[in-house]
Amino acid sequence: MRLRIAIGIPTYRRPDRLAALLASMPARIAEVEGDVDVLVLVVDNDASGTAHDVVRAAPLPVRYDIEPTPGIAAVRNRLLDLASDRHAIAFIDDDEVPRPEWLAALVSTWRRTGAAAVMGRVISVIDEDADPWVLATGVFRRRSRPTGLEMRAAACGNLLIDLDQLRRTGVRFDATLGLAGGEDTLFSKQLLAAGGRIVWCDESQADDAVPAERITRAWAMRRAFNGGNTAVHVELRMEPRPIHQLTIRARRLLGGFARTVVGWLRHAFGRLRGDLHADARGLRTAYRGLGMMAAAGGHMHREYARASEGALA
């Protein structure tokens, strides 16, 4: 049987990065072994269609569509709809460039394990002159894991999904998290709860060149705050019973407070001792705790919101 795979690329106003990603696709597709038909899909979250000319200039056929609803969740759901006749979809973000064997490794691991999803590695590429304090926070650190390891959650920056298994579960991306983030974590946890398995593939790798505007202390702390905030919102959405949600809110409020206090103390002592790692990690922990407390109180931080419309991560 011929295997039909889609490559799903969500995009929002990153024409240069999207062009580099599309330029890499022919070589990555050619590496996949066996009788495979690969369709490249690009869904633009800019209603004005700023990615259209980039797609037209791509070195391979690309199916292009626009999803005007702001937020990454709506875009990913649109990509799933466009891939309705495919056996699997491999998500990759528009600011990444896949390394050799990226797709081949995902497909090989999927075939071998029969998992509902296979997650590959995203590697942050950072300028050598980046602020050491920001790097010490660990916000850009992405771990390597042994291939085949079963995951308890997944991000969608490098993720292959078995669409036949997904359709049986009915799981979709939650649009209410589209501008906050965490929609991929919730999606993967719901897939697991429905009986699916998610495994790691360390041989599938993609580079993410981090722009200078993100290598700042302010951005790192916003990221930490948002991480704590979305983690609680994901947990709340996984628990439909109101009384249990109240318990979650109470626990996370206390846990967030403890993180904030411990983090600030570690940060302060780290500065006094000249310990860069303790200084940076402590403040990151404190901001994550603040995000948890905010979510426990009902606040959702919309990290990707803009003045008029949402942006992708």
Image: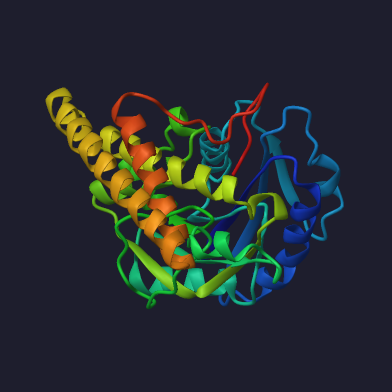
The spot of residue 46 in percent (x, y) is: 72, 32
Q: Is residue 114 or residue 265 the one in the foreground?
A: 265
Q: Is residue 22 or residue 259 the one in the foreground?
A: 259
The spot of residue 138 in percent (x, y) is: 48, 62
Q: Residue at x 67, y 34 (%)?
A: 45
Q: Is residue 262 left or right of residue 272?
A: left
- Residue 284 is at least partly visible in this image: yes
The spot of residue 106 in percent (x, y) is: 49, 69
Q: Is residue 105 or residue 164 the one in the foreground?
A: 105
Q: Is residue 226 left or right of residue 194?
A: right
- Asked if 230 appears above or below 307 in the picture, the reply is below
* Quarter holding residue 34: bottom right
Q: Is residue 252 or residue 51 the one in the foreground?
A: 252
Q: Residue at x 49, y 52 (%)?
A: 156
Quadrant location of the C terminus in the rendered image: top right
Q: Residue at x 66, y 58 (%)?
A: 210
* Quarter holding residue 206: bottom right
- Asked if 197 appears above or below 253 in the picture, the reply is below
The spot of residue 263 in percent (x, y) is: 35, 51
Q: Residue at x 53, y 32 (%)?
A: 179
